[in-house]
Image (cartoon, rainbow, N blue to C red):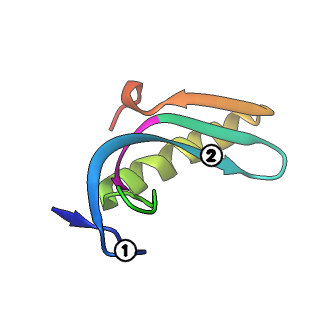
Amino acid sequence: MTKCIACGASAEKGLTTSVTDLGNCLIIVRNVPCYKCAECNEVIYATEVVQHLEAIIESAKKLMQDISIIDYSKTAA
Protein backbone atom coordinates (compact mmCIF):
# COMPACT_ATOMS: atom_id res chain seq x y z
CA MET A 1 0.00 0.00 0.00
CA THR A 2 1.23 3.47 -0.86
CA LYS A 3 1.04 6.27 1.69
CA CYS A 4 0.44 9.92 0.81
CA ILE A 5 3.59 12.01 1.17
CA ALA A 6 1.52 15.05 2.18
CA CYS A 7 -0.76 13.67 4.91
CA GLY A 8 0.15 9.99 5.43
CA ALA A 9 -3.26 8.58 4.44
CA SER A 10 -3.68 5.70 2.00
CA ALA A 11 -3.18 6.43 -1.68
CA GLU A 12 -5.10 4.37 -4.25
CA LYS A 13 -4.08 3.52 -7.81
CA GLY A 14 -5.80 5.70 -10.36
CA LEU A 15 -5.40 7.95 -13.38
CA THR A 16 -4.96 11.70 -13.54
CA THR A 17 -4.32 14.51 -16.00
CA SER A 18 -0.95 16.25 -15.92
CA VAL A 19 -0.83 19.89 -17.05
CA THR A 20 2.50 21.58 -17.79
CA ASP A 21 2.54 25.29 -18.61
CA LEU A 22 5.74 26.22 -20.42
CA GLY A 23 4.74 29.85 -20.87
CA ASN A 24 4.48 29.71 -24.65
CA CYS A 25 2.58 26.41 -24.75
CA LEU A 26 0.40 24.21 -22.56
CA ILE A 27 0.94 20.44 -22.54
CA ILE A 28 -1.90 18.30 -21.22
CA VAL A 29 -1.28 14.57 -20.73
CA ARG A 30 -4.39 12.54 -19.96
CA ASN A 31 -4.74 9.08 -18.37
CA VAL A 32 -1.46 9.26 -16.44
CA PRO A 33 -1.12 6.37 -13.96
CA CYS A 34 -0.70 7.57 -10.39
CA TYR A 35 -1.62 7.07 -6.78
CA LYS A 36 -4.25 9.46 -5.40
CA CYS A 37 -4.67 10.20 -1.71
CA ALA A 38 -8.15 9.39 -0.43
CA GLU A 39 -7.92 12.23 2.11
CA CYS A 40 -6.19 15.23 0.53
CA ASN A 41 -6.22 14.31 -3.22
CA GLU A 42 -2.41 14.55 -3.45
CA VAL A 43 -1.16 12.85 -6.64
CA ILE A 44 1.92 10.62 -6.43
CA TYR A 45 3.78 9.34 -9.51
CA ALA A 46 6.08 6.31 -9.70
CA THR A 47 9.62 7.08 -10.89
CA GLU A 48 9.10 5.43 -14.28
CA VAL A 49 5.91 7.46 -14.84
CA VAL A 50 7.78 10.70 -14.11
CA GLN A 51 10.50 9.70 -16.58
CA HIS A 52 7.93 8.87 -19.26
CA LEU A 53 6.05 12.14 -18.64
CA GLU A 54 9.31 14.06 -19.04
CA ALA A 55 9.94 12.30 -22.38
CA ILE A 56 6.39 13.10 -23.55
CA ILE A 57 6.84 16.77 -22.60
CA GLU A 58 10.21 16.98 -24.39
CA SER A 59 8.63 15.53 -27.55
CA ALA A 60 5.67 17.93 -27.35
CA LYS A 61 8.00 20.92 -26.86
CA LYS A 62 9.56 20.17 -30.25
CA LEU A 63 6.16 20.65 -31.90
CA MET A 64 5.70 24.02 -30.17
CA GLN A 65 1.94 24.17 -30.50
CA ASP A 66 -0.08 26.48 -28.28
CA ILE A 67 -1.82 23.49 -26.68
CA SER A 68 -0.92 19.80 -26.91
CA ILE A 69 -3.25 17.15 -25.51
CA ILE A 70 -1.66 13.70 -25.32
CA ASP A 71 -3.05 10.39 -24.05
CA TYR A 72 -0.35 8.77 -21.85
CA SER A 73 -1.70 5.28 -22.54
CA LYS A 74 -1.20 5.76 -26.29
CA THR A 75 2.49 6.67 -26.11
CA ALA A 76 5.40 4.25 -26.25
CA ALA A 77 7.10 3.62 -22.92
Q: In which quarter of the image is the N terminus?
A: bottom left
Mark closer to the chain start, 1 or 2: 1
- The location of residue 74, given as percent across then percent down, is 40, 24
Q: Is residue 25 highlighted in magenta? A: no
Which quarter of the picture shows residue 29? top right
Q: How many marks?
A: 2
User: Where 71 sits versus 26, above or below?
Assistant: above
Left or right: 23 in relation to 6: right
Residue denoted by label 2? 19
Q: Which residue lies furthest to the right in this view?
A: 24
Query: Which of the two discs, 1 and 2, sits closer to the camera?
Result: 1
User: Where 50 sits versus 66, above or below?
Assistant: below
What is the three-letter code of the residue carrying label 2?
Answer: Val
Q: Please state the extent of the stretch shown in magenta in the rendering.
A: 31-37
Mark 2 Cα shell of 10 Å, populated few (<14), some (14-19), many (≥20): some
Left or right: 17 in relation to 13: right
Residue shown at the point (81%, 33%) measured from the top left: 66
Q: Disc 1 to disc 2, how far (Cα)?
A: 20 Å
Residue denoted by label 1? 5
* Viewer-proximal residue among 55 and 53: 53
Q: Quadrant of the C terminus?
A: top left
* Viewer-proximal residue among 63 and 18: 18
Numbered disc 1: secondary structure:
loop
What is the three-letter code of the residue carrying label 1?
Answer: Ile
Q: Do the residues labelled 1 and 2 touch (CB within 8 Å)?
A: no
Residue shown at the point (36%, 58%) measured from the top left: 37
Which quarter of the picture shows residue 46? bottom left
Left or right: 71 in relation to 12: right
- The location of residue 72, given as percent across then percent down, is 43, 33
